[in-house]
Image (tube, rainbow, N blue to C red):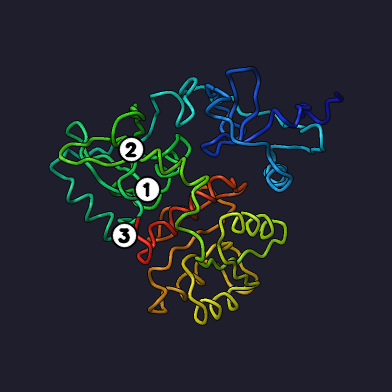
């Protein structure tokens, strides 16, 4: 195939999404490369293969400079970053070992309550968790879960060190190997145990048992993106309520019960942050789960009950976010 402007033509079936939501290109039978990080991942198509990318996802990759163009047979990939610092990693869920990440602070374990108070005082208690590991205070993600991959951990590291340098100016990243066949898939910190439930990750991609009849408000201005999200919600047997602006969204939420809001951070009539603040001012919407779609990968994990997905949005990741929010809804406890 002809080479265009530094791009390489790859058969379309070689560019796909893995079961855990990574966008990858396959180079041989057991090796794929993450399109965003450049990391090489071990691959077994019996366990790791998700599905081919649809036109909507390829368009987002094009908008983000990873794809030059595509057609029904080929995808022209731009040169990928070569990030081999951590070597070949296992795709989460493959084999009987997985790798998860956390951040190490400079504080000894005796300061864990002080770190928790700092997170709480500055509004991060719902997004990050301070725990003890090997005599040091470490930072994990929401609900005390380790960060699922190196990119999420690095984003958290940048966010905390930038927003709260007086506390987290020298965070270092570390990983832990977990056994995904252990009874509870647990990460053990000193005197505390946290579940990393891989069964939930798998179930979120097919289980609709607790979703039927739930209502989701979709406030996505981009037509193609809204259509793709609507198609996903329909497959999950979820009622869809659409709004074209922030004002329309607020009226819709006030008049119609909903269990989840999926919104673009950029609305035609106001910024998403202002929109979220107005939603939280309404008493019966203060605990409404919200999934925010954003172009900035480092915006997330700052507001309780708000999940963040950066473009290009993985449909598998969006499905997991929806399933988690609705499954944990108080009206339908898991």
Which residue: 38% across, 79% down? 283
Tell me residue 142's x, y (percent): 35, 50
Please name the residue that numbered disc 2 is placed on. Answer: 103
Tell me residue 39's x, y (percent): 54, 26
Q: Nearer the viewer, mark 2 or mark 1?
A: 2
Examine the rendered structure and indicate whether residue 77 appears above or below residue 321: above
- State if disc 1 and disc 3 touch (CB < 8 Å): no
Which residue: 68% across, 42% down? 61
Helix, strand or loop at mark 3: loop
Name which of mark 3 and mark 1 comes first in the sequence.
3
Instruction: Identify which residue, 271 or 179, lies in the foreground.
Output: 179
Density class for disc 2 (Cα within 10 Å; few <14, some 14-19, many ≥20) is many
Quadrant assignment, res 48 = top right
Image-based side of 318 in relation to 77, left or right:
left
- State if disc 1 and disc 2 touch (CB < 8 Å): yes
Please name the residue that numbered disc 3 is placed on. Answer: 122
Helix, strand or loop at mark 1: helix
Which residue: 42% across, 38% down? 148
Q: In the image as oriented, which residue stretches furthest toward the left?
A: 110
Tell me residue 59's x, y (percent): 73, 46
Q: Quadrant of the N terminus?
A: top right
């Amino acid at each position: 195939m002809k080479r265009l402007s530094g791009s390489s033509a790859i058969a379309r079936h070689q560019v796909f999404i893995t079961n855990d939501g990574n966008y990858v290109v396959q180079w041989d039978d057991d090796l794929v490369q993450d399109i965003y990080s450049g990391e090489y991942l071990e691959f077994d198509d019996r366990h790791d293969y998700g599905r081919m990318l649809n036109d909507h996802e390829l368009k987002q990759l094009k908008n983000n400079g990873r794809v030059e163009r595509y057609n029904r047979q080929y995808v022209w990939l731009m040169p990928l970053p070569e990030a081999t610092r951590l070597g070949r990693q296992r795709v989460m869920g493959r084999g009987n070992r997985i790798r998860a990440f956390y951040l190490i602070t400079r504080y000894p374990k005796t300061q864990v309550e002080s770190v928790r108070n700092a997170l709480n005082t500055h509004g991060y208690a719902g997004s990050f968790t301070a725990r003890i590991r090997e005599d040091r205070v470490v930072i994990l993600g929401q609900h005390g879960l380790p960060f699922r991959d190196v990119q999420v951990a690095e984003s958290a590291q940048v966010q905390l060190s930038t927003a709260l340098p007086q506390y987290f100016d020298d965070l270092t990243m570390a990983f832990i190997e977990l056994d995904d066949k252990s009874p509870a898939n647990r990460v053990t910190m000193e005197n505390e145990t946290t579940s990393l439930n891989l069964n939930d990750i798998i179930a979120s991609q097919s289980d609709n048992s607790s979703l039927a009849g739930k209502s989701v408000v979709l406030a996505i201005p981009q037509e193609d993106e809204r259509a793709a999200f609507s198609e996903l919600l329909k497959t999950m047997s979820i009622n869809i309520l659409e709004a074209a602006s922030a004002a329309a969204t607020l009226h819709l939420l006030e008049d119609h019960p909903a269990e989840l809001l999926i919104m673009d951070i950029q609305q035609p009539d106001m910024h998403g942050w202002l929109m979220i603040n107005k939603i939280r001012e309404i008493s019966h919407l203060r605990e409404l789960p919200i999934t925010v779609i954003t172009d900035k990968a480092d915006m997330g994990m700052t507001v309780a009950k708000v999940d963040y997905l950066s473009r290009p949005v993985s449909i598998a990741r969006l499905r997991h976010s929806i399933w988690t929010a609705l499954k944990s809804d108080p009206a339908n406890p898991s």
